[in-house]
Image: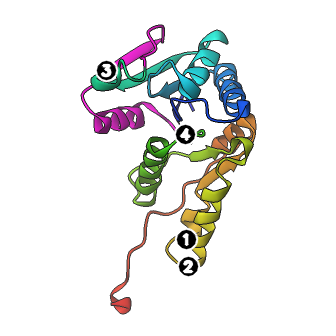
Amino acid sequence: MKSLAVFCGSRFGSSPIYQEDAQKLGRELAKRDIMLIYGGASVGVMGAVADAVLTAGGQATGVIPYFLEKKEIAYKNLTDLIMVDSMHERKAKMAELSDGFVALPGGPGTLEEFFEVYSWAQLGLHQKPFGLLNSNHYYDPLISLFDHMRDQQFLQEKYHSMTLVDTDPAGLLDQFASYQDPDVKTYITEKQT
């Protein structure tokens, strides 16, 4: 793995653990010589992970739409800052540049980015690992929802197990290194219609 997209919030959240885990992930990416691909902001959890990567001697590429450049306060000292016209272009560029995807704590935008790569994986549009850094058990309710989806037969077990989860950045990246993509999505058979 040479690059990793990180989806996360432009705020710090209520617990200092979110910032600390973002920094741990950033240092771990630099240590493993994995380039950070992220939303390009200098604030919140986004800024914390980028700061940690760069301080540890790693590389960080930000992708930010022009309209968010001032609102999210674009990080000017990155290895590379790519400006795009829309959120759609931002996600497409991040996906193109990345060998995997991690969601740190964040809000609806973070979840939207995560769910898009999850859906794409189910459809066989990519075979890249993706997961949740479950800092301070932030994603426990979402993990329970995935279990509920599986139990209610809206999520097949092979797709349920695609989401890698860990509370430790190094442990999560170790899981990424051994990730095996399941078969592509199966659809309803003629017999079921």
> Label 4, on which residue?
106
> Which amino acid does the dot numbered 4 rest on?
Gly
Q: 191 or 25, which is in the foreground?
A: 25
Q: Quadrant of residue 47?
A: top right
Where does residue 19 sit, x and y in percent of width and height? Answer: 67, 28
Pointer 4 or 3: first along the chain: 3
> Label 3, on which residue?
83
Near mark 3 (Cα within 10 A), the count class, few <14, some 14-19 or many ≥20, is some
Q: Is residue 8 above or below residue 181?
A: above
Q: Is residue 128 magenta?
A: no
Residue farthest to the front? 14
Q: Is residue 185 above or below residue 21?
A: below
Q: Which residue range is magenta in the image?
A: 73-102
> Label 2, on which residue?
152
Kindly report the distance in space between the C-alpha atoms of the residues bearing marks 3 and 1: 37 Å
The residue at 42%/72% (across/down) is: 186
